[in-house]
Amino acid sequence: MRKGVAAQEAPEMTGERPLQKAEQIYGLLRQAIVRLAMVPGAAISEKELCLQYGVSRTPVREALKRLAEEDLVDVFPHSGTYVSKISYEVAEEGFVIRRALEIESIRRATRFVTEAEIRRLDALIAEMRDILRRDALTDYIEVDDAFHATIAEISRFPRIWKFINLMKAHLDRMRQLSAPVPGHLAEVTEQHAAIVRALERRNADQAELAMKIHLDASFAVMSAMHEDGQFFRRND
């Protein structure tokens, strides 16, 4: 993990409108923060970002403003801008919202799921297993999200996942911290498989139970990260 701006190749942004540039920079920075490429507490230099992306300060400041609104960046006038520390309370709130919506989503999905959609979910699980074999753990969260987003699509309420995604940034950083826990992601993958098999049977109760087991067990592992405290706010 780097302590400053994420080490990624900046896209070509010449000729784009300031709002488009700001949106793109926002997306790249948000991903870097969630994936912990920009670690909690790291200083952010507007000048470095401008050089990295080849833009003026206007789109950079707009991107940072949006990140501050999501509580992912702390801006201290006359002092500096920093990646925010993880708030356990905000992460827990995101988990509670996610759990409630995903339980509703999975129950609805059992009514609509098709064989083609089961194959899509199985393909994502196969991708997760490949990630584990390659030990590319930082890539897991994106495939994990694709899995849950697909269930929301199957439920015919795809905006459920869009809303969850807005609420879970602090939770996602805890997910990333928990990725290296021995055996954790392997267990998560098998929990995903259990969810798919319940969907395949069109059994709403079994699917709900499988989803609850998955989400609750994952959050228990993530919560243990809070005890270390290095990347967390001490007082929220």
Image (spheres, rainbow, N blue to C red):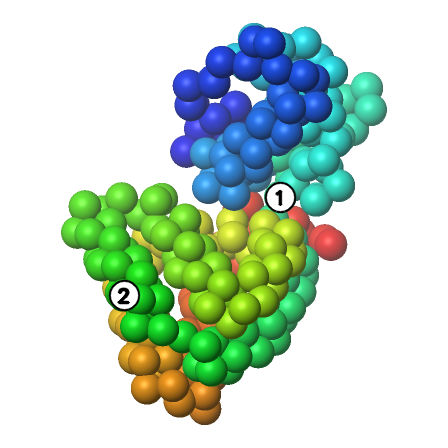
| Residue occupying the point 45% across, 88% down | 204
- Disc 1 on helix, strand or loop? loop
* Residue at position x 42%, y 19% in the image: 9
Name the residue tied to disc 1: 85
Above or below 96: residue 139: above
For disc 1, the neighbor class at 10 Å (few under 14, some 14 to 19, many from 20) is: many
Q: Nearer the viewer, residue 123 or 125?
A: 123
| Label 1 with label 2: CB-CB less than 8 Å | no
Image side of residue 189 versus residue 89, left or right? left
Q: Tell me where residue 223 appears, x and y as whole percent.
A: 51, 64
| Residue at the spot 25% in from the left edge and 53% down from the top edge | 127
Q: Residue furthest right?
A: 77
Task: Write down the residue under mark 2.
Answer: 119
Q: Mark 1: which amino acid?
A: Lys
Does residue 81 appear in the picture of this structure? no
Residue 72 occupies quadrant = top right
Residue 83 is situated, as x and y percent measured from the top left of the image, at: 62, 34
**Mark before the other along the chain sequence, 1 or 2:** 1
Kind of residue sitting beneath label 2: Arg
Residue drawn at x 64%, y 68% is 97
Q: Is residue 139 above or below residue 94?
A: above
Residues at marks 1 and 2, CA–CA distance in whole angstroms: 39 Å
The picture places residue 130, in percent across and down from the top left corner, at: 20, 52
Which label belongs to residue 192? none
* 148 displayed left or right of 182: right
The quadrant in which the C terminus is found is bottom right
Secondary structure of the residue carrying tag 2 is: helix
* Foreground tag (1 vs 2): 2
| Residue 34 seen by the camera | yes
